Amino acid sequence: MEELELYVHVPFCVKKCRYCDFYSGPASKEVQEAYIETLLEEIRSCPFGQNENERVVSVYFGGGTPSILPEEALIKVLSGLREQFRFDENPEITVECNPGTVALKKLKAYREAGVNRLSFGLQSVRNDVLKTIGRIHTYEEFLESFHAARGAGFTNLSVDLIQGLPGDTPETFQNGLKTVLALRPEHLSVYSLILEENTEFYALHEAGKLLLPTEEEEREMAHAAVRILEDAGYGQYEISNFALPGFRSVHNTGYWTGVPYLGFGSAAASFYGGKRFRNALSLQYLDLPYEETEELSEEDRMNEFMMLGLRMNDGVSDRAFREKFGRSFYEFKGSSLRKLTEEGLLESIKKPDGNDTVRLTSYGRDLANYAFREFV
């Protein structure tokens, strides 16, 4: 079986968060309805993913706020995907949800349609911080949504948190993390705040008007998150992701390990057949043809395989690299691997079967972006 992943971008939200650079924004009901129809037409006309050996192992509805749509609209899109592609027996099907945009009725409809995983964008347990970053919900509304998801029968829930937000300290961040852990979600994503251009926070930072934790404080938060989560039984399997046993994100793991994926909707990206495509950026979304197409060279693909694989705590297997590219990663990037090892950012593990694996050290994860420069 050849694995395939599907991504659907829903670019609508109630309002733009102050740190967000994803392609998203408010839109009228009429624009949303027209978008869904064009999305279904794109799915029906997709020429890829038709190999008899291919099976869809994950579907991910991202945004924006997918849960802002009426449940009938999202389920209609999921049905369209099932009609067009061959699904594995039990694929992971995830919907990103903002607290306050889902209720028990909608969540039950999701479950009945086959959605089996939800990802809640909480970001912080502090209402003052949530207001500062432009979120539309309170922590209390998150709790209502989380408990409604449990009531609807969901047994695979993920929660997003951001470390390094304005007004946060290492102590308040740790307290917030422990508060979320008391709910025992199956998965947590703990991201660092990134100041992207074309966001309100970036402009404020450039003007010296955004008070953020220091680099040392943010590093303290990151280290504390690993320690606290591991003590609570969550394994770190990627730089920003932690899961209880058996609950690693199938979709994200596939992305980091090179599983082909097809993206649908405005600004959605695809990687299939050694090529990368990206759809046009338009909330109206009336043009189906891909706006950008890039054919990756063999060297590009090898660099990307190494860089994405090193995000994973398991690292990159030399055997897997050989199977994919016909040569050792030492032959490809031996000098870079030696350099990163000497600097304490990388370690090599020889398995009993003789298979070499390289992975970032704890120090290397702190300086991951520096390490990744060797593979660009």
Image: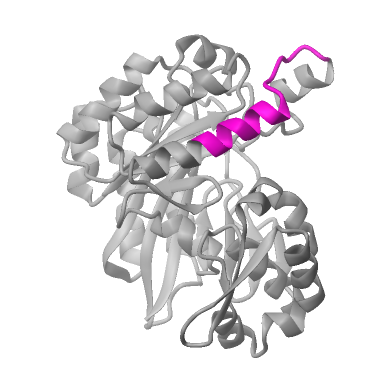
Q: Is residue 211 left or right of residue 102?
A: right
Q: Name the residue at the bottom extreme.
A: 326
Magenta-highlighted residues: 208-224
Nearer to us in this view, 254 or 213 = 213
In the figure, 132 relative to 68: above or below? above
Residue 307 belongs to magenta span: no
Q: Is residue 362 left or right of residue 295?
A: left
In the figure, 2 relative to 14: above or below? below
Please give the name of the residue rendered at 64% of the width and 26% of the height, measured from the top-left corner.
Answer: 19
Residue 211 belongs to magenta span: yes
Q: Quadrant of residue 318?
A: bottom right
Q: Name the residue at the top extreme.
A: 128
Question: Residue 29: percent from the left, percent from the top?
Answer: 43, 27
Instruction: Let me know if residue 66 appears in the view.
Output: no
Question: Residue 88: percent from the left, percent from the top?
Answer: 29, 69
In the figure, 100 relative to 269: above or below? above
Please give the name of the residue rendered at 61% of the width and 37% of the height, measured from the top-left corner.
Answer: 22
